[in-house]
Amino acid sequence: MRDFFTIIGGMGTAATESYLRLLNQRTPTDCDQDFLDYILVNHATVPDRTSYILDRTKPSFYPALLDDVQQQSQLNPAFMVIICNTAHYFYEQLQQATTVPLLHMPRTAIATLKAQYPDIKRVGLIATQGTLADGIYEQELQQQNYDYTLGDKQLQADVMTLIYDNIKTKGVVDAPLYHQIIRRMQQEFGAEAVILGCTELSLAQEKAADHDALIIDAQSIIVDKSIELALKVRAGKTITIKNGLAD
C-alpha cells in the first residue's frame, strides 16, 4: 500500500474507535474505494501515560511508542498521528526518531482555536492529571497569549473520575458529570470555550454533546486534519508539516 498514513492508537482503545468512527463518517465517499488508506496501530498495552508522568518509578510509555514509530517508519507513511494527548509528552523525542512527520494534536487544537475563534480570550482546559502536569497545552496557550483556567481541585478530580472510573474502567460516559464539568467551567471559571485535552473526553463529547458550550475538541480537530492531509496525499499533492502543524 502506498500513499497512506499511520494512526498510533490504543491509548485507550475506545477513544481510538471514536477517532476512526469520525474519520470514516467525515470522509467524502461514494464507494468503498473512496475511503482513506491508513494503518492502525492499536497498541493497547502501552503503559499508562498519566501514571508515569506523575510517578517516574512507574513504567515509561516512551519505549513502546518509539518502537511503534520506528516500525511504522519502515513502511514510509505520508504522516503519522498519535491518538492520545498525554502521549505528546514525548513528541519531540519521537519526531527526532523518524523522518516521517508527526502531527501534534494539542498544537493543532490551539492553532484551530486561534484561527476559528479569534475573539476568544479566556479558555478552560480539562484533561488528565498527566497532561496538566506536563504542561503540553499550557505551553501552547501561553505562547498564544490566552488567559486560561484549569478549574479547581474538585473539577480536576471529577475529570479524572469521568475518564478513568467511567470511560476507561466501565466503558460508559457519565453524561451528567460531563455536563456538570463543562457548566462549571463556563459559569464558575469564566471559560468562553472549553478545550478537551484528552481523547476520552472527546468520546464523552461524541456521546453527550447536548449542551451549549463552545468546545475545542482536539480529537475532532485532528480527525479533520487527517482527512485533509490524506486527500492531498491521494491527489499527489505535497503536504508540509512543520513542528507538528500542517500548512
Image (cartoon, rainbow, N blue to C red):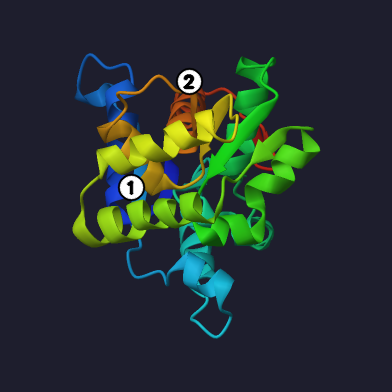
Disc on the earlier residue, 2 or 1:
1
Q: Nearer the viewer, residue 64 or 159?
A: 159
Q: Report which quarter residue 20 is drawn in.
A: top left
Residue extending farthest front = 188
Say which residue label 2 marks: 235
Residue 133 placement, left or right of 219: right
Tell me which amino acid carries mark 2. Answer: Ala
Residue count near mark 1 (Cα–Cα under 10 Å), binned few <14, some 14–19, many ≥20: many
Residue count near mark 2 (Cα–Cα under 10 Å), binned few <14, some 14–19, many ≥20: few
Disc 2 to disc 1: CB gap under 8 Å: no
Q: Residue at x 68, y 57 (%)?
A: 92
Q: Residue at x 35, y 23 (%)?
A: 211
Vertical comparison of 176 with 119: above or below: below
Q: Residue at x 27, y 44 (%)?
A: 17
Q: Position of residue 11 (x, y in %)?
A: 38, 58
Q: Position of residue 193 (x, y in %)?
A: 55, 26
Say which residue label 1 marks: 15
Is any atom of residue 190 visible in this view? yes
- SS at circle 1: helix
